[in-house]
Image (spheres, grey):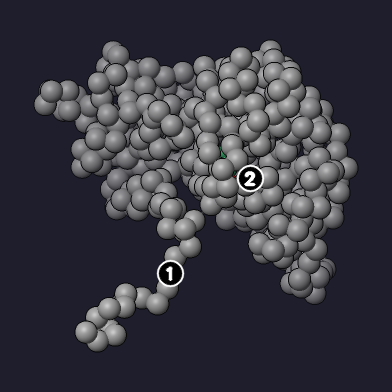
């Protein structure tokens, strides 16, 4: 037998953690939805019409004119100091007093999730999550090999009584505002009870808030971090209020954790692009978001209303949803006997796509659930997409 017959074709051996990771279901679906003609209500992409192109163009020109050398040079791992100060001032308006040194600028809040996993999770330790939860967080934590425990939830978020089951976990990962995927927003009373319960069992919180500014009628209650600053790591993002292509987010951590998060950040990418940080700071420093964000809210509210009307018109009895008061998503429960994964190919065949809800559960997936985004396509297409979903549903039911 020759050596070439006995040896594997590749000299590479995957690390166990790489061998264990799977492609994101959402990314795989998005590939299908890139086919021309598909109305995709699947991706969580902000509307490109909301991108502040002119403001970015002008700010970019100013940064390159006034500070070209600094903007194009390596920069501090913590982030651009004026941007960190801006974030700290914003948080103070929401009731969370933090020192700018507690703000770490990250390459999207997705990197914040990775850093939190790297610093706080050991193999075999436990992380608690909501049901459903953000799939990208499950992916970010997975390489650090935690066991995942799911906390019982209702339409108002995690049940405080359920937290005792998560005692001993490294943290509870929670999305209080217009959650991805369920759209739910935790009310004031539940927030208070949740934080009390978390403190009682000494369960720290990782609060992820990319959607909080996208409210339609009233701002959500103050962040959980404002109630328990030393027990909460807070993640924020510029993706949904400016543009996701900037890859700009931030982590606000209790002082004790900051050095470790910073070291993890240094090892990951030295720093978040300083050029992007300076341009964004240049855009927002004089209050740009105070006029810009309301235009996004108005656009998304109209699109939410278009989807609500389409759902009411086209979906049959037995389907359930709650109307989100902000954010980007409707969460649908189809009749109990419908499997949204099995239904997807026929929906795509008819010309629309969604994300099956099962992907968002760490355990005990609900097969009859799915997520629809109302922000990426225009209202006329929203209506048609929902109609096609109803057709796919009707066809599957008639097939029995
Ligand atoms: C809940 C949640 N967290 C974090 C992210 C990552 O956002 P970004 O890395 O663009 O800031 C997303 C993106 O959609 C999200 O929905």
> Which picture quadrant has residue 207?
top right
Q: Is residue 8 visible?
A: yes
Q: Name the residue: 58% across, 18% down.
A: 162
Quadrant for the C terminus in the image: top left
Q: In this picture, is 159 found above or below 211?
A: above
- Mark 2 is surrounded, within 10 Å at the Cα level, by few (under 14), some (14 to 19) or many (20 or more) other residues, namely many
- Left or right relative to 339: residue 185: right
Label number found at residue 121: 2
Q: Is residue 279 visible?
A: no
Instruction: Determine the CA span between mark 1 and mark 2.
Output: 24 Å
- Which of disc 2 and disc 1 is earlier in sequence? 1
Label number found at residue 13: 1
- Left or right relative to 14: residue 398: left
x, y percent for residue 145: 54, 47
Q: In this picture, is 146 found above or below 277?
A: above
Q: Is residue 109 or residue 288 the one in the foreground?
A: 109
Q: Name the residue: 35% across, 35% down.
A: 356
Q: Secondary structure at mark 1?
A: loop
Give the quarter the ligand 1 occupies. top right
Q: Name the residue: 42% across, 49% down.
A: 24
Q: From this viewpoint, which residue is outermost toward the bottom?
A: 2
Q: Is residue 200 or residue 272 the one in the foreground?
A: 200
x, y percent for residue 30: 37, 49
Label 1 CB-ligand 1 distance < 8 A: no
Q: Name the residue: 86% across, 49% down.
A: 101
x, y percent for residue 219: 68, 24
């Amino acid at each position: 037998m020759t050596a070439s017959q006995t040896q594997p074709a590749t000299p590479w051996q995957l690390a166990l953690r790489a061998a264990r990771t799977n492609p994101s279901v959402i990314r795989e679906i998005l590939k299908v939805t890139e086919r021309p003609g598909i109305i995709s209500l699947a991706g969580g992409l902000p509307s490109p019409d909301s991108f502040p192109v002119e403001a970015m163009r002008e700010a970019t020109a100013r940064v390159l004119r006034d500070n070209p050398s600094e903007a194009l040079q390596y920069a501090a791992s913590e982030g651009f100091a004026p941007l960190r100060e801006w974030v700290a001032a914003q948080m103070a308006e929401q009731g969370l007093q933090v020192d700018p040194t507690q703000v770490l600028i990250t390459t999207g809040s997705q990197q914040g999730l990775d850093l939190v996993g790297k610093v706080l999770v050991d193999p075999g330790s436990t992380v608690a999550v909501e049901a459903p939860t953000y799939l990208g967080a499950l992916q970010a934590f997975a390489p650090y090999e935690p066991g995942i425990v799911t906390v019982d939830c209702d339409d108002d978020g995690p049940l405080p009584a359920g937290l005792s089951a998560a005692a001993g976990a490294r943290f509870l990962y929670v999305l209080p505002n217009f959650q991805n995927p369920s759209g739910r927003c935790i009310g004031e009373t539940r927030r208070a009870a949740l934080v009390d319960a978390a403190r009682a069992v000494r369960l720290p919180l990782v609060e992820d808030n990319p959607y909080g500014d996208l409210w339609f009628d009233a701002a959500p209650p103050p962040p959980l971090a404002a109630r328990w600053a030393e027990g909460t790591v807070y993640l924020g993002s510029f993706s949904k209020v400016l543009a996701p292509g900037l890859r700009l987010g931030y982590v606000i951590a209790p002082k004790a954790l900051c050095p470790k998060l910073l070291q993890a950040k240094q090892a990951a990418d030295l720093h978040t692009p300083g050029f992007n940080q300076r341009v964004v700071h240049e855009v927002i420093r004089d209050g740009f978001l105070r006029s810009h964000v309301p235009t996004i809210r108005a656009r998304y509210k109209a699109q939410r209303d278009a989807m609500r009307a389409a759902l009411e018109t086209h979906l049959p009895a037995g389907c359930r949803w709650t109307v989100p008061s902000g954010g980007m998503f409707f969460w649908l429960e189809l009749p109990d006997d419908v499997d949204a994964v099995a239904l997807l190919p026929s929906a795509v065949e008819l010309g629309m796509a969604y994300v099956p809800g099962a992907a968002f559960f760490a355990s005990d997936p609900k097969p009859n659930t799915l997520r629809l985004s109302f922000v990426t396509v225009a209202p006329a297409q929203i209506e048609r997409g929902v109609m096609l979903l109803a057709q796919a549903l009707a066809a599957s039911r008639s097939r029995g």
